Amino acid sequence: MAGRGARLGTAMPTALDHINGLRSVQSRALRLSPASQFVRSARSELALTQAAFAQALGVSRKTILRYENGSPVPERSVIAIRALLDEAGRNVGSRRGTNKA
């Protein structure tokens, strides 16, 4: 637990400096795979929540969350997403970079 308290001790002054405008916070850009971007773009294009999209694909909402955050997307899910897009008359950019299951 000593390590945790030490981190808090160094993080608190940094946070206060940021609040007071004395320091900027650096963030790391999240790089998503093309498959993750495809899933997210498709869901957005269809204007569906993660829960509704999951139901349409026959998977859990947690699975959609994982796909969108970088977990491998099985080919069967990509095919199902393409079918949903085709059915809705929509098209989403890159469909490369998917993993076969």
Image (spheres, grey):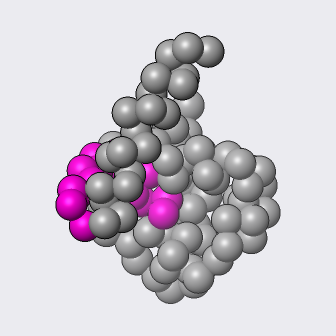
64 relative to 100, above or below? below
In the rendered image, which quarter contains the N terminus? Answer: top right
100 relative to 12, above or below? above
85 inside magenta stretch: no
Q: Is residue 86 visible?
A: no
* Residue 81 percent coordinates (x, y): 56, 62
25 inside magenta stretch: yes
Image quadrant in which you'd find residue 54 = bottom right
Magenta: main secondary structure equals loop
Figure label count = 0
Q: Is residue 91 visible?
A: yes
* Residue 97 percent coordinates (x, y): 33, 43
4 vs 13, nearest the viewer: 13
16 vs 68, nearest the viewer: 16
Q: Residue at x 50, y 16 (%)?
A: 3
Extent of the magenta region = 21-40
- Residue 40 appears left or right of 96: right
78 relative to 86, above or below? above
Q: Residue at x 31, y 59 (%)?
A: 18
In the rendered image, which quarter contains the C terminus? Answer: top right
Q: Residue at x 48, y 63 (%)?
A: 40
- Residue 36 appears left or right of 60: left
Q: Residue at x 24, y 50 (%)?
A: 26
* Residue 24 percent coordinates (x, y): 22, 58
- Residue 74 appears left or right of 56: left
